[in-house]
C-alpha cells in the first residue's frame, strides 16, 4: 500500500510538469503594442503591452501561463507593463532585428531567467561588430515583479553575430543557444546548464546565410534551417542535441528567404520570403537537396514577409507585413493545400504589426526522479518537528515549495522532499503522526447553584481516550462532552490518553452554593424627600452574595443589602439576593408610601391701587395645615382660601406644615401703588419767548414710579416730566397735568399761563470796525427802553443810538425792555491797526542804474506815483530808473482799509566813476581781488582791454567792460610780477581815453 502511495506521489511530481510544460510560451508580445494569449488554445488579443518594434521581441510566462515579463531588445517590462527598475539601458537591437531577443529559463532556479540580445542589420557592421550579450532577470526582486540584476547586465558572449538565434532544450536539463557568425559562416552553440553558459561549440557552415533571416531547430531537435535573406540561400543541416554540433549541410535556393517554421512532426518546412511568397518543403527526403527542392509547394503568393512561429496548439502563425491581420497554418503536418493556410485568421482591434511575431520559449523538464526512503514516525505531544533530507545535494524541493535541506512541520501528515542534482533527483516520504497535547477542557473554575446540571466540554479528537474523574454524578465519564449534577464543591479532572503516548490531565474547580433566605422589614410611609433605612435579615450571607434592588430609582446603592429608600412616588421595591452562583436567587419586597411635599400657590405677583381687596388661595394635600403671613389685612390667615386688603407693598407667604415633614412655603409679591393728589401750580403771566418752568406738587411725593403727562404739550420742553419748561411767544395756554402709577392709579390738575407777546429788539447795524481816530454809530429799535453793555467807549449806554469810539475791539449787548419783558441783541465793534510805512528820504544813482525801493510796511496794497521810471506801480518794492531827479509818492493800504502816504527822492548823478586796480591775487575767483576787472559807474564804454606779461606776451583781452581776467593763460596761472595794461574807450562826456599802466 505504501508503494502505491509513493507511485501516486511520483506521478503528482512528474505529470503536472509534462501537462503544463508549454504554458510558459502561451503569451506573445510583438509589433506595436500587440499581444496574444494562447492559454485557451486559440489566440485572444490582449491590451496594454508596451512593445514598439518591427521584429525581435520575446515574452515569457510562468508554468500556469501567467505573464512574467517581456522585452523588445533595449527594455524589460514586468507583468504590469511597467519598466523594471533596472530594465532600461539594455544593449540590443533598436527596433528591427529578426531574432535579436530570446528568453530562456536558468536551469536549476525557479526565479532566474536569461535575456539574450543581438544587434540589428542597420548597425552591423558599420557601427558595431554584432555583439551577443546576455542579462539575468531575478523574479524575486521588486516585490515579485522582477528586475535585471545589476551585475549581470549587458554581459558580452560573442561578436560578429547576425540578427538570428534560437534556444532549444538540450538532451539533459539545460538548453542550447544557437547563433550564426555572419563573418565566418559558423554556427555557435552555447550549452546553458545550472552551472551557467559553457563556451560555444563552433560548426562551419557551407553556404553563406548572412545577417538577416531566421534560424530554427526542428521540434525533435534533429535538424536546423538557416534562411539567408540577401544571399537567397536556405541551408538545411543536422543538429546533434547531445553535442550542439551542426553538420551534413545542403542548400535550397530561394529568392530572399526570411521566415522559417517547422511542422510539429519535424517533417515539413515552411519558408517565407521578402517576395510575399510562403513555400512548403517535404523534409522526408533529407539529405537529398534535389528531392527537397522538388517538393516545393507555394502555399500563398500574398502572405507578406514575416517570421513564422509554432504555437503550443500545433499551429504556425505569421503576420501580414505592415498590417493588422494575423495569418495561420492550421495543419502544418499536412502537405500541399491540406495544410489549410488562412490569410486573415485574426484581425487586430488595436496596435499594428510589421514583420516579426516574437521568439518561442523552450521549457526543459527532463529531471530523472527515483523513489527514496519512507519514514513512519509517532511524535507524542510535540508542537513542531524538523524533517531533514540527506546533506550535500545542490537541489532540494519540499512539498510546500521550500528549498532548504530541512523543514519544520507543525502537525500530522504526509510530507516529501525531492533532492539531488538538477537532472537526477530522489524523493523521500515522511508519514508523521503528531498527536496534539493541546486538547482543552472548555470549563473554567466555576460557581454553580446546588442541584444544577453543568455541561462538561472538552475537544473531541479522534484517536484519543477520555476519562472524567471522579465519576460520581457524571452522566458519561468516558465521553469528552457530558454533564455533571452539582451536589457538592469539588475538583473535576479529565484524563486524556493517545495510544502509544503517556496520558495528560486537565481539571477545573466547581464550587456549589446554597439558595439564600431573606426576611424583609414591614412596609411603611414617608414624606417626600425623606429616606427610610431598610436592613433585610439574610442568615449565612458572605462576601459572595450579591444584591439587586428594583427599581433602582430612589435607592441609595442598588447593589447593597442595607439601603436607604427615598422614592418620589409610592413604590414597591424588590430585592434579589444571589448566593454567588447562576440561578441561585431569591426575591422579597417592601412597599414605601410617599406623602407629596408640594403646594400650588394660585396667586402670582400683582400690583394694586391702595384700598383694593383681592382673594388669596393655595392648593395642597388636605393633611397639611396652612398659615398666611403677615396677618395684617388677611381676612383669615389660617384658611387655604381667604382675602387680603394690603396696607403696603410686600411679600405674602403661605406655609404648609405636617409633623415629620419639612415645612413647605411659597409667596407672591403685592406692589401697592398710591392714588396721587396733584397740584399743577398757580396761574401766572409770563413774557413771550422767555422759558418758564412749571413746578407741580404730588402727594405722596416719595413714590418713584409716577408718570407725568402735560397736555397740550405744544410749547413744553418735555410733556412727560414733572417740571417742564414752557415757552410761547404770543399764545396763552391752559395746561392739564395727569399723574399716573404704572397700573393706572391717577389724578389731574390744571394751570393757566397768560403770555405777553414778545417784541424783538432790532439792531440796525451789523458787526463793524474803524481805523483810529474814527468812530461808529450804533442804533437799536422796537423797544421802550435800552441798556448797552459794556458802556466802555459809548457816548451814552441808555439810549437807542450811541456813538462808539472804544480803544480796542468790543462786543456790545443791547437789552430792550417792553411791558416788563426784555430782548437782547449783540454787535462787534473792531478797532483796526493803522498803516505803517518806512523808507529813506532819498537815494543817488548814476545814469543807466536802477534802484529797488526799500519799503517796510504792514500794508497789503500799494500805489506809486508818478509811474515814469518804475517797473510796477502796485507792488511794495518796484525798481526805479529815472533819467532825472524824481520824487516818488506811495500810498499803502492795510487789509481793513487803513492808509498812509510817504515819498522818496531818486537823485540822478550825471558824472561817472572809472578806476583800474593796481594789484590782484590770480586764481582766487571767490575773492574781490581774485578777478582783475575795471571798476566803473555811469555810462563808461570800453573798446579794448589788454593785459601783457613783462615779456610782452598778450595774456588777456576783451571788449566787454563787465568781463575780467582771472590770471590764467593757456589754462595755467601766470607767475607773480608786473603786468602791462592797455585800455581804450570813451566817457559820458564823449571824451576818448587810451591808457597804458604797468
Image (cartoon, rainbow, N blue to C red):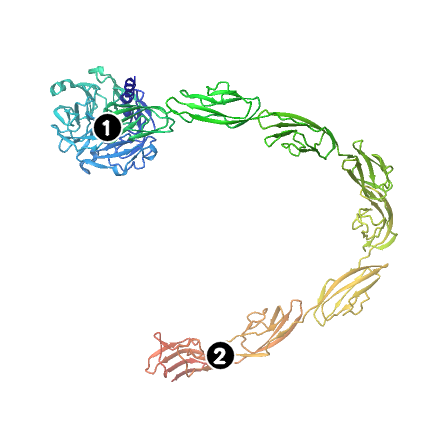
Closer to the camera in the image, 6 or 395: 6
Quarter assignment of residue 572: top right
Q: Can residue 11 be seen?
A: yes
State the residue at coordinates (61%, 31%). 542
Q: Which residue is mark 2?
A: 938
Q: Which residue is mark 1?
A: 422
Circle 2 sits in a helix, a strand or a loop, which is it? Answer: loop
What residue is at 72 percent from the left and 65 percent from the top?
Answer: 768
Q: Position of residue 645 (x, y in %)?
A: 86, 40
Decide if residue 328 is on the left or right side of residue 410. Answer: left
Q: Is residue 764 visible?
A: no
Q: Which mark is residue 52?
A: none
Callout count: 2
- Residue 512 x %, y %: 56, 26
Which sits in the foreground, 967 or 611? 611
In this image, 905 relative to 1: left or right? right
Comes first in the chain, label 2 or label 1:
1
Amino acid at each position: 500500500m505504501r508503494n502505491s502511495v509513493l507511485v501516486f506521489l511520483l506521478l503528482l511530481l512528474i505529470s503536472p510538469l509534462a501537462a503544463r510544460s508549454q504554458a510558459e510560451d502561451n503569451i506573445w508580445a510583438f509589433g506595436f503594442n500587440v499581444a496574444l494569449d494562447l492559454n485557451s488554445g486559440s489566440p485572444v488579443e490582449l491590451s496594454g503591452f508596451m512593445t514598439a518594434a518591427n521584429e525581435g521581441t520575446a515574452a515569457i510566462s510562468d508554468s500556469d501561463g501567467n505573464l512574467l515579463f517581456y522585452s523588445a531588445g533595449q527594455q524589460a517590462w514586468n507583468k504590469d507593463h511597467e519598466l523594471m527598475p533596472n530594465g532600461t539601458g539594455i544593449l540590443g537591437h533598436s527596433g528591427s532585428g529578426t531574432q535579436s531577443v530570446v528568453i530562456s529559463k536558468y536551469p536549476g532556479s525557479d526565479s532566474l531567467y536569461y535575456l539574450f540580445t543581438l544587434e540589428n542589420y542597420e548597425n552591423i557592421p558599420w557601427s558595431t561588430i554584432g555583439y551577443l550579450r546576455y542579462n539575468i532577470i531575478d523574479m524575486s526582486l521588486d516585490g515579485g515583479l522582477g528586475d535585471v540584476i545589476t551585475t549581470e547586465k549587458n554581459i558580452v558572449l560573442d561578436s560578429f553575430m547576425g540578427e538570428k538565434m534560437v534556444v532549444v532544450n538540450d538532451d539533459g536539463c539545460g538548453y542550447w543557444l544557437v547563433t550564426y557568425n555572419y563573418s565566418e559562416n559558423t554556427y555557435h552553440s552555447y550549452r546553458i546548464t545550472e552551472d551557467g553558459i559553457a563556451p560555444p561549440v563552433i560548426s562551419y557552415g557551407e553556404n553563406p546565410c548572412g545577417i538577416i533571416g531566421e534560424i530554427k531547430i526542428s521540434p525533435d531537435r534533429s535538424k536546423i534551417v538557416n534562411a539567408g535573406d540577401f544571399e537567397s540561400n536556405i541551408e538545411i543541416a543536422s543538429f546533434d542535441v547531445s553535442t550542439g554540433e551542426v553538420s551534413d549541410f545542403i542548400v535550397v535556393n530561394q529568392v530572399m528567404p526570411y521566415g522559417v517554421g517547422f511542422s510539429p512532426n519535424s517533417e515539413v518546412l515552411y519558408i517565407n520570403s521578402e517576395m510575399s511568397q510562403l513555400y512548403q518543403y517535404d523534409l522526408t527526403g533529407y539529405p537529398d537537396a534535389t528531392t527537397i527542392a522538388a517538393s516545393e509547394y507555394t502555399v500563398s503568393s500574398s502572405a507578406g514577409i514575416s517570421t513564422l512561429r509554432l504555437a503550443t496548439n500545433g499551429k504556425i502563425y505569421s503576420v501580414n507585413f505592415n498590417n493588422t491581420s494575423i495569418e495561420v497554418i492550421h495543419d502544418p503536418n499536412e502537405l500541399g493545400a491540406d495544410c489549410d493556410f488562412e490569410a486573415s485568421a485574426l484581425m487586430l482591434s488595436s496596435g499594428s504589426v510589421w514583420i516579426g511575431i516574437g521568439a518561442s520559449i523552450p521549457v526543459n523538464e527532463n529531471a530523472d526522479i527515483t523513489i527514496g526512503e519512507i519514514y513512519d514516525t509517532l511524535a507524542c505531544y510535540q508542537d513542531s518537528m524538523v524533517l531533514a533530507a540527506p546533506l550535500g545535494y545542490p537541489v532540494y524541493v519540499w512539498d510546500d515549495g521550500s528549498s532548504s535541506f530541512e523543514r519544520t512541520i507543525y502537525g500530522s501528515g504526509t510530507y516529501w522532499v525531492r533532492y539531488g542534482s538538477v537532472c537526477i533527483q530522489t524523493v523521500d516520504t515522511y508519514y508523521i503522526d503528531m498527536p496534539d497535547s493541546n486538547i482543552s477542557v472548555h470549563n473554567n473554575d466555576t460557581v454553580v447553584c446546588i442541584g444544577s446540571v453543568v455541561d462538561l466540554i472538552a475537544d473531541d479528537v479522534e484517536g484519543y481516550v477520555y476519562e472524567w474523574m471522579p465519576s460520581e454524578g457524571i452522566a458519561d465519564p468516558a465521553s469528552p462532552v457530558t454533564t455533571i449534577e452539582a451536589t457538592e464543591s469539588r475538583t473535576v479532572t479529565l484524563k486524556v490518553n493517545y495510544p502509544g503516548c503517556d496520558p495528560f490531565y486537565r481539571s477545573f474547580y466547581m464550587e456549589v452554593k446554597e439558595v439564600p433566605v431573606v426576611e424583609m422589614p414591614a412596609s411603611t410611609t414617608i414624606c417626600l424627600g425623606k429616606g427610610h433605612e431598610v436592613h433585610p435579615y439574610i442568615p449565612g450571607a458572605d462576601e459572595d452574595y450579591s444584591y439587586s434592588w428594583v427599581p433602582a430609582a430612589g435607592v441609595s446603592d442598588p447593589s447593597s443589602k442595607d439601603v436607604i429608600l427615598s422614592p418620589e412616588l409610592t413604590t414597591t421595591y424588590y430585592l434579589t439576593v444571589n448566593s454567588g452562583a447562576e440561578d441561585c436567587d431569591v426575591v422579597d419586597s417592601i412597599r414605601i408610601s410617599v406623602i407629596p411635599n408640594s403646594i400650588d400657590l394660585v396667586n402670582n405677583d400683582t400690583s394694586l391701587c391702595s384700598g383694593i381687596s383681592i382673594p388669596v388661595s393655595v392648593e395642597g394635600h388636605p393633611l397639611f395645615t396652612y398659615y398666611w403671613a403677615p396677618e395684617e389685612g388677611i381676612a383669615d390667615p389660617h384658611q387655604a382660601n381667604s382675602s387680603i386688603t394690603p396696607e403696603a407693598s410686600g411679600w405674602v407667604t403661605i406655609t404648609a406644615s405636617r409633623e415629620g415633614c419639612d415645612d413647605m412655603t411659597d409667596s407672591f409679591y403685592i406692589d401697592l401703588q398710591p392714588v396721587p393728589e396733584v397740584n399743577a401750580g398757580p396761574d401766572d403771566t409770563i413774557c413771550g419767548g422767555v422759558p418758564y418752568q412749571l413746578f407741580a406738587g404730588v402727594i405722596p411725593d416719595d413714590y418713584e414710579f409716577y408718570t407725568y403727562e402735560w397736555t397740550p404739550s405744544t410749547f413744553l420742553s418735555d410733556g412727560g416730566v414733572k417740571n417742564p419748561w414752557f415757552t410761547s411767544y404770543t399764545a396763552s395756554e391752559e395746561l392739564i397735568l395727569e399723574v399716573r402709577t404704572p397700573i393706572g392709579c391717577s389724578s389731574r390738575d390744571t394751570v393757566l399761563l397768560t403770555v405777553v407777546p414778545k417784541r424783538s429788539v432790532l439792531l440796525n447795524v451789523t458787526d463793524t470796525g474803524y481805523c483810529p481816530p474814527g468812530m461808529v454809530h450804533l442804533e437799536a429799535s422796537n423797544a421802550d427802553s435800552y441798556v448797552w453793555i459794556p458802556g466802555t467807549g459809548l457816548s451814552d449806554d441808555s439810549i437807542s443810538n450811541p456813538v462808539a469810539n472804544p480803544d480796542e475791539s468790543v462786543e456790545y449787548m443791547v437789552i430792550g425792555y417792553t411791558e416788563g419783558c426784555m430782548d437782547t441783541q449783540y454787535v462787534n465793534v473792531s478797532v483796526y491797526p493803522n498803516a505803517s510805512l518806512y523808507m529813506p528820504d532819498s537815494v543817488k544813482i548814476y545814469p543807466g542804474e536802477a534802484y529797488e525801493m526799500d519799503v517796510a510796511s504792514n500794508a497789503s496794497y500799494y500805489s506809486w506815483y508818478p509811474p515814469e521810471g518804475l517797473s510796477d506801480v502796485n507792488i511794495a518794492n518796484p525798481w526805479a530808473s529815472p533819467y532825472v531827479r524824481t520824487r516818488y509818492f506811495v500810498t499803502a493800504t492795510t487789509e481793513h482799509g487803513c492808509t498812509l502816504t510817504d515819498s522818496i527822492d531818486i537823485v540822478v548823478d550825471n558824472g561817472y566813476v572809472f578806476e583800474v586796480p593796481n594789484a590782484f591775487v590770480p586764481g582766487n575767483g571767490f575773492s574781490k581781488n581774485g578777478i582783475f576787472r575795471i571798476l566803473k559807474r555811469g555810462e563808461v564804454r570800453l573798446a579794448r582791454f589788454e593785459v601783457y606779461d613783462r615779456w610782452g606776451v598778450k595774456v588777456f583781452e576783451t571788449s566787454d567792460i563787465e568781463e575780467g581776467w582771472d590770471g590764467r593763460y593757456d589754462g595755467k596761472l601766470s607767475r607773480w610780477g608786473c603786468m602791462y595794461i592797455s585800455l581804450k574807450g570813451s566817457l559820458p562826456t564823449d571824451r576818448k581815453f587810451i591808457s597804458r599802466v604797468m
